[in-house]
Amino acid sequence: MTKLILAGPDDLDHVLRLLGDFHAETGITQDEATRRAALAPLLDGSPHGCVYLAGPARAPIGCVVVVFGWSTAFGGMEGKIDVLYIRPGVRGRGIGSEILATLPKALGAAGLAALHLDVARENNALHRLYAKQHFRARDNILRMTRKL
Amino acid sequence: MTKLILAGPDDLDHVLRLLGDFHAETGITQDEATRRAALAPLLDGSPHGCVYLAGPARAPIGCVVVVFGWSTAFGGMEGKIDVLYIRPGVRGRGIGSEILATLPKALGAAGLAALHLDVARENNALHRLYAKQHFRARDNILRMTRKL
């Protein structure tokens, strides 16, 4: 059973390193200052999200960033898995699935109406992994974005 | 020029009526208590979103619900247009486009990194309207959702 530990301000370095690895692997280019500014509030009790470390806090094997939003259609607060990152060396052991099975229960108990995630449209292996954990593809929705 | 007025607790009845009309038109089934619970915090200063009334506050011609979220990839706070509703009687006059042109500037000035919206995949007329206002379709993303 992988332990999820709510990360606090003291965990910033660990989380920064994991997120940096995640960005490198997924091709997201972001400078360290931006990454730090996007993460620090989530460790400091921001209402907009929180970070969990997977495994021992001193040597985490991964992290989950959950961000909070709101939806009038869903009737209140909702969440989104912004990042789910497992270190390459410990993949294939079902840790991600385990997290996806347990985390929604905790978030539902905390009053969230729905949990979302965005996945690359062509990554069928990931779709299947998420579908097994009761995430349903919403093919009828097109997301449009304007950078500000 | 359509005036956007930030709605407060006193505007709950107006906003409830507009959102009810929006739900009726778009086929969202929601009881009044749920609708009220999802709206009231946004009029009371919740960090998760806010509501604007379009036109005169006493006889609004529409409303916009903007919800706030967070994205580590976008580097901080982001927004989403949860609802953009214009009364049927005043449509076709460019009011929606006007709102979509001015609102992002205000939200960008307030520090938001990006503004999103979800649109029905088959509604090409809406895609074009949003594209004209610099919203880009993110076809490579599949949203998956688990109800909690």
Image (cartoon, coloured by chain):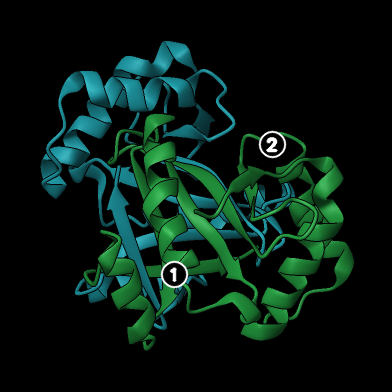
Chain colours: A green, B cyan
Identity, as a three-letter code, of the amino acid under mark 1: Gly
Identity, as a three-letter code, of the amino acid under mark 2: Ser
Decide if residue A9 is on the left or right side of residue A25. right
Q: Tell me the element at label 1.
A: loop
Question: Which residue is at 42% across, 26% downward?
Answer: B56
**x%, y% of residue B89?**
19, 42
Q: Can you see residue B82? A: no
Above or below residue B21? Residue B116 is below
Residue A46 is labelled as: 2
Decide if residue B17 is on the left or right side of residue B41. left
Residue A2 is labelled as: none
Question: Which residue is at 81% across, 49% downward?
Answer: A11
Decide if residue A77 is on the left or right side of residue A29. left
Decide if residue B24 is on the left or right side of residue B37. left
Query: Gap between marks 1 and 2, in whole Å?
Result: 30 Å
Question: Which residue is at 48% across, 60% downward?
Answer: B116
Q: Chain of mark 2?
A: A
Question: Which residue is at 71% across, 44% downward?
Answer: A7
* Residue farthest to the front, as pictured: A1
- The verdict on a common chain for dots 1 and 2 is yes
Above or below residue A6? Residue B108 is below
Q: Chain of mark 1?
A: A
**x%, y% of residue B17?**
23, 25
Which residue is identified by label 1? Answer: A94
- Label 1 Cα neighbours within 10 Å, binned few <14 / some 14-19 / many ≥20: few
Q: Name the one closer to the observer, A125 or B121.
A: A125
* Quadrant including the C terminus of chain B: top left
Q: Name the one closer to the observer, B118 or B61.
A: B118
